């Protein structure tokens, strides 16, 4: 007694039918057939492939060693990519070609309804040591002070360099460690004073990137600050940046 062969599945029948149809077609007919019957599968596969490539790139970028990571939140709508390109060219002249990451897309504005998200993003970036220095306006500078993220410049910088900053009136003396408690009252129990920023408003950088502010009538221009983040592992390069960005 002969055993009857197992009937092919519906899927295999469809595959065989499509292969037979494909063989009967020629040239552009084959391309049209594939596109008509498989375009959504093709587009789906391409979408998955693109997502995999983007995820791999993000993972690689996150692990990529950077020489310096700088967050720039200007008071104007300008971008300072050209300035940092020139800075990197001079910085890398010492033979170290590790890149400098300049994030100019981090918003920080307490007039924004989602300002708490800005705080979370900045806090996360600092805690993961992905920010070595910052160029920012009063809102972000105030937040950095409240979380005690600013390195005291008179302690971090050589005496000669800090004296030169003092001669130009650049160091800003502020109070760090002040935050609002659960009742909305400022808690000053851990507050202390220090020179935590440079005011860039009168520097060449400030005159180029901080003078075209959108101001209401009678409103004074907002200052622009340079801050070194306390937990940076690249203090020497931060000081090189501070020296360059504070040139008159």
Image (cartoon, rainbow, N blue to C red):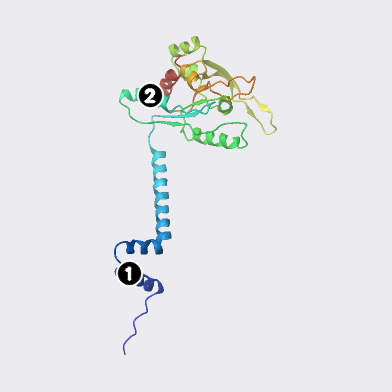
Q: Is residue 2 left or right of residue 157?
A: left
| SS label for mark 1 | helix
Q: Is residue 239 left or right of residue 75?
A: left
- Image-quadrant location for residue 97: top left
Q: Position of residue 138 (x, y in %)?
A: 58, 24
- Give the number of the disc on residue 86: 2
Q: Is residue 99 left or right of residue 78?
A: left
Q: Position of residue 4 (x, y in %)?
A: 34, 84
| SS label for mark 2 | helix
Circle 2 or circle 1, nearest the eye: 1
Characterize the local packing of mark 2: few (<14), some (14-19) or many (20 or more) Cα atoms within 10 angstroms: few
**Residue at x 47%, y 11% (from the top left corner):** 163
Instruction: Relative to 177, say whether 122 is above or below.
Output: below
**Residue at x 34%, y 61% (from the top left corner):** 31
Between residue 188 and residue 122, name the one nearer to us.
122
- Give the number of the disc on residue 19: 1
């Amino acid at each position: 007694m002969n055993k009857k062969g197992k009937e092919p599945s519906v899927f295999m029948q469809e595959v065989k039918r499509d292969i037979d149809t494909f063989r009967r077609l020629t040239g552009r007919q084959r391309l049209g057939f594939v596109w008509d019957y498989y375009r959504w599968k093709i587009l789906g596969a391409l979408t998955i492939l693109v997502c995999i490539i983007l995820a791999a790139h993000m993972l690689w970028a996150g692990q990529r060693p950077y020489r310096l990571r700088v967050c720039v939140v200007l008071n104007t709508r300008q971008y300072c990519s050209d300035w940092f390109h020139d800075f990197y060219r001079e910085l890398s002249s010492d033979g170290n070609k590790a890149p400098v990451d300049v994030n100019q897309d981090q918003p920080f504005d307490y007039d924004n309804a989602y300002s708490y998200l800005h705080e979370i993003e900045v806090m996360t970036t600092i805690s993961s040591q992905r920010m070595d220095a910052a160029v920012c306006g009063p809102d972000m500078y105030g937040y950095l002070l409240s979380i005690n993220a600013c390195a005291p410049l008179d302690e971090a910088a050589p005496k000669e360099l800090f004296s030169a900053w003092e001669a130009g009136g650049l160091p800003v003396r502020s109070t760090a460690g002040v935050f609002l408690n659960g009742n909305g009252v400022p808690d000053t129990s851990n507050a202390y004073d220090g020179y935590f920023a440079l005011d860039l408003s009168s520097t060449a950088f400030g005159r180029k990137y901080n003078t075209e502010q959108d101001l209401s009538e009678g409103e004074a221009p907002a200052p622009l600050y340079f801050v070194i983040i306390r937990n940076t592992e690249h203090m020497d390069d931060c000081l090189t940046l501070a020296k360059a960005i504070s040139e008159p």
